[in-house]
Amino acid sequence: MLSWVDGQPASQLPLSDRGLAYGDGLFETLRVSGGRIPLLTLHLQRLAAACQRLAIGLDLAQVEEELRTFAALLGQGVAKLIITRGDGLRGYAPPAESRPRRILLASALPEWPDQHAEQGVRLFPCQTRLAEQPLLAGLKHLNRLEQVLARAEWQDPVYAEGLLCDTSGRIIEGVFSNLLLVKDGVLLLPDLQRCGVAGVMRAALLQVAGEQGIESRIGDLSVDDLLQADEVLLCNSLYGVWPVCGYLQRHWPVGPLTRKLQAIAHILLEG
Amino acid sequence: MLSWVDGQPASQLPLSDRGLAYGDGLFETLRVSGGRIPLLTLHLQRLAAACQRLAIGLDLAQVEEELRTFAALLGQGVAKLIITRGDGLRGYAPPAESRPRRILLASALPEWPDQHAEQGVRLFPCQTRLAEQPLLAGLKHLNRLEQVLARAEWQDPVYAEGLLCDTSGRIIEGVFSNLLLVKDGVLLLPDLQRCGVAGVMRAALLQVAGEQGIESRIGDLSVDDLLQADEVLLCNSLYGVWPVCGYLQRHWPVGPLTRKLQAIAHILLEG
């Protein structure tokens, strides 16, 4: 499969990379469709903000150019971009003169059953809780052991995703998706100031919802809020929107706002 | 510098490794002295326990044999062992048939000033707090962005280490050391059930202290406990024991129990 390191075809990386040593870096998972990357601007904006927070001095214009070339070569599928702080001395201190490393990996778009999008998915109740770390919250960084532990909790394919709460019991997100609730026509989004990944599709839907006069609120949400929601949906920038049809004993029909957001996501991803 | 992957000389690693993708792995930093590894049994015990918690099926006998061979070749210095879950498909789910990867990296022992051990070190007050994640607490795993952020807070060499508290304000450890207090002749150790790395030298000192009739207690400790301590010390399995001589406005002389533990650590490391 197609893979690049610093713009050159490569399948390996130096053992001295701080991405391996400390998870000292970030990633973006980008859908590639017709040789192009939908939502590229939002991906790049998130990456820029994340690099600033971690003080990684990335040349974003170069990354954008590489992504466009890589996507054109790939045509269809998924491009995973990993940015690390680069090589490091032994020790946690970021080297004064670090040169970030850019890794691009191609893969096929996962073949999810159509019914995930059509009838909705059941959420597995993960026991793994997300720790509250405001300094890293929102970032799609390379420290993802919590997600590994959470995803290892179930194998039953009846669950397409799992619900992650934080250590205080607030609902936050899915393992690889953002979570949105609908209550009385208002879109409710978990606050991601303490933990969670601020997804690009979440940001795009929030923006379009605003433009279309759909009220939305970001705040702390409990499992009770979830159970009392009129509609529940998941989103990410690969599959778009999946309705949630079940969590524990609660079942939901696919609601109208979910279908509307799903159509918006479809347009965002397919153009 | 000497480096191995799965027992063979190598300087690179496949881009598909989950250590890079998710920090899905563990590490050990081992002192090598006269071709041998002091505290090897404790390192291997910690690694075994950590692999069990992360469900990484490592062949520990093979790791031990490789470590011994590597140390004999290296002679003097530091061996860093990184264990990853191995290659992964895209996605967080640990592959059913994952084959852990063993990485060994040699480096020289850092040249710390003698005065660190003799007169003690000042602790930098880190603003970065450790998130509370009981599922990962104690493990020396590859998700180390908190340490990277904390270590980036200071450059002034007057501070040899930094003090890390958790998000609730308890004192936990140094950035690359464990922290111990002495109060009324009793050794006080921060509880590492919520966060922190359970260091091998910490475990060794605790064991020897018990054998020598030195009372020790593990529990929640505050910055006030630190400031009111009679002695404060740091330890790890590379440098042994450093007295702490200052934190904020508080200064400590090097106390008798610190010197005793330092002598024990010296014997443990030098034989």
Image (spheres, coloured by chain):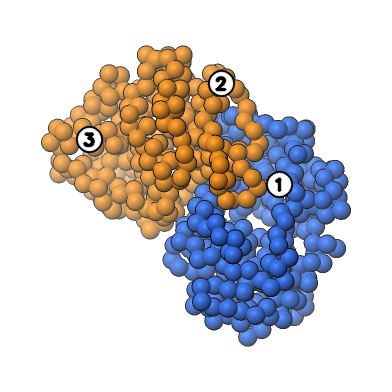
Chain colours: A orange, B blue
Q: Which residue is mark 3?
A: A207
Rendered-image quadrant of the N terminus of chain B: top right
Q: Which residue is mark 2?
A: A8
Where residue B158 sits, quadrant-wise, is bottom right
Label 3: element kind: helix
Is disc 2 surrounded by few (<14), some (14 to 19) or many (20+) residues within 10 Å?
Answer: few
Nearest to viewer (mark 1 / mark 2): 2
Nearest to viewer (mark 3 / mark 2): 2
Amino acid bearing label 1: Lys
- Left or right: where does residue B74 sit relative to residue A154? right
Amino acid bearing label 3: Gln
Label 1: element kind: strand
Is residue A110 among the parts visible in the rendering? Answer: no
Is residue A240 among the parts visible in the rendering? Answer: yes
Rendering coords of residue A187 (x, y %) = 21, 41
Q: Please tell me which residue is depicted at 64% across the width and 45% down the height of the picture.
A: A89
